[in-house]
Amino acid sequence: MGFNQLIFLWTGIFPIAVLLYYFFRKKYTKQSVSSTLFWQEVMKETKASPYLQHLQRNALFYLQMLSMILLVIALLQPFWKTKGLTGEQIVFIVDTSATMKVNTNNSTLFDQHIKQMSYLVEELSGKPLTIITTGNQPKVIVRQETNLNRIKNEISKLEVSYEDENMLKSLDLAQSFFQNKATSVYIFTDHLDRQSIPLQYANVSWNVEGLTTEVSNVSIKRFGATKTNSGISALIQLENQSNIEQITELTISNEQNKLVKEKVEIPPNDIVTLSFNELVESSFLNATIDINDQYALDNSMTVFMQNQLSKVFIDSSMHSLVKTAFQSMDIEVSSIPTEQVGLLQEEGIFVTNQFESIDKLDRPTLFIGRNDSSAKDVNGRVQTMEHAIFSFANLSDIYVSAVYPPVDGFETIATVGEEPFIQVSPRGDIIILSDIQMTDWPLNPSFPLFLWSVKEQLSAGNSYLGTFSPNERKSLSLGSVANEWEIYTMNDTYEYSIENGGAFIAPQKPGLYRLISKDTEKNFAVALSQKEKEITKGTSYKLTGKQIESKANYNQHSIVPYLLIVLLLLFVIEWEVQRRRGFTS
């Protein structure tokens, strides 16, 4: 508690003067006694309650003294202090990625952040607040808002979007609000590296609220399936992200029955890869693990068994290891002469290096090398982008000695140093810009796994749109007689509609969905990214532009309004006491 106007302390002489006046004034006690016979009874009553009698006789004195003292205190402008938020403005950056659903202390991390935000807004004291949520496209929920009710309402409506956090994008957006003002930024996430924070702002403090407890999590890291001559082959990877061995029950089922039920032991901080062959024909497969961990979103994964091109035709000029790799996965393979590339009418996938024939090929094609240009030497590590064909194949350990020139207009999804290594054409063809002889890739276990993923990618039929990330926006040429598409879950629950020709926006929650029009039905999947299947313990910390702790800031709350209410009540009581005694006395 403190006082803002100590200069008015001299007004304390007024209650002292009133006190002295009461000390030196003449005092008379009126006592009416009808007869001396009752004198003794009156004295007994006076002695029985002397304090009450004294208060009744001097009530006006005590009321006036109390009023005077409270008036003096009010002139000093007293206040009490509460801890407040530093800075001229406040910015909240809220992580809404899927990992915010991790359970700690009997609630999700996201719910804990919501409670913490609600507590912090009580300390704003009129300072403007900006709230930014993370995602592929960070959103500004409130901008420079001071209305406390609106702020609380918007915070209560926040929800997990299941997208990647893309924290760097949110940090860039937050910097546009600084404008050389003293700013306190609060980041609500699970884990954020200190090196990611832009510390060049001397008047900005950074407060990171992270996941501070250890979390036990077992994840279905990857799950894929393909049709073969003997049925369906499935490949699954389970990851134990805890420091102790975990035992879980793995179940793979289709739309009707359980196909696989098996107990799996996973060593601490390790990945187990399992394969299952000759599974019965199904429209989709669902894999689940029965384990009591703290993050349930990665305990289930579904793949849709689209209409596929099951046969692979390999150019006879290709290296024999390419054919061997496909055959090792029980995929039907046929060799064709080079001169027949582009002439074959049978349905299947082509593997060739005849890049000059790309315009003549009307079917999915894997190009390994190019016959229309010369390769140049390269040196560097192979790096891959986020793409479905790298789900099971890790290319970081392979060596590439030379690459062919890249194709303009094609998307690069892997590089060697600064040079493109793997590209994807606009229609979906995959081009490896190197011959097998220029790499040690066939000696690496990732080679057949990569070819398996390529076969899955190229064999998807027109009824399958593909796999999308939550809320992913993409322009698709859907083509329908009707002007509207409706999105349903596999349980026929309606989600929303999109207009034909408009941008396709994937649903928020992971799972299998159907896109239905009047005359057409297409299937697609929504899946979490690999990043959102990894739970990392973080820390809560505070940094300023100079990486030093700033002094605590306090908000002042005036007591004067409450004193005025008490004074008004005292004045009413004084008036009533004076009225009963008579104003003339």
Image: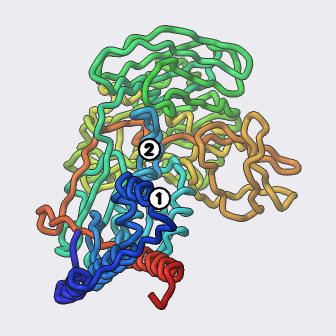
| Callout 1 crowding tier (Cα within 10 Å): few <14, some 14–19, many ≥20 | few
Is label 1 in a helix, a strand or a loop?
helix
Q: Is residue 401 left or right of residue 575?
A: left
Q: Please, what is the three-letter code of the amino acid marked with disc 2?
A: Met
SS under mark 2: helix
> Residue 76 bears which disc, if any?
none
Q: CA distance from mark 1 to mark 2?
A: 88 Å
| Image location of residue 544, percent across then percent down | 18, 65
Q: Nearer the viewer, mark 1 or mark 2?
A: 1
For the residue pair 8 and 468, the one nearer the viewer reads as 8
Q: Is residue 537 above or below residue 143?
A: above
Circle 1: residue type: Leu
Q: Quadrant of the C terminus?
A: bottom left
Q: Residue under circle 2? A: 100
User: Residue at 52% of width from left, 54% of height from top?
Assistant: 425
Foreground: 303 or 16?
A: 16
Residue ID for mark 1: 37
Q: How is the image coloured?
A: rainbow
Q: Upstream in the sequence, badge 1 or badge 2? A: 1
> Residue 543's spot in the image, x, y percent?
19, 61
Q: Position of residue 346 (x, y in %)?
A: 70, 34
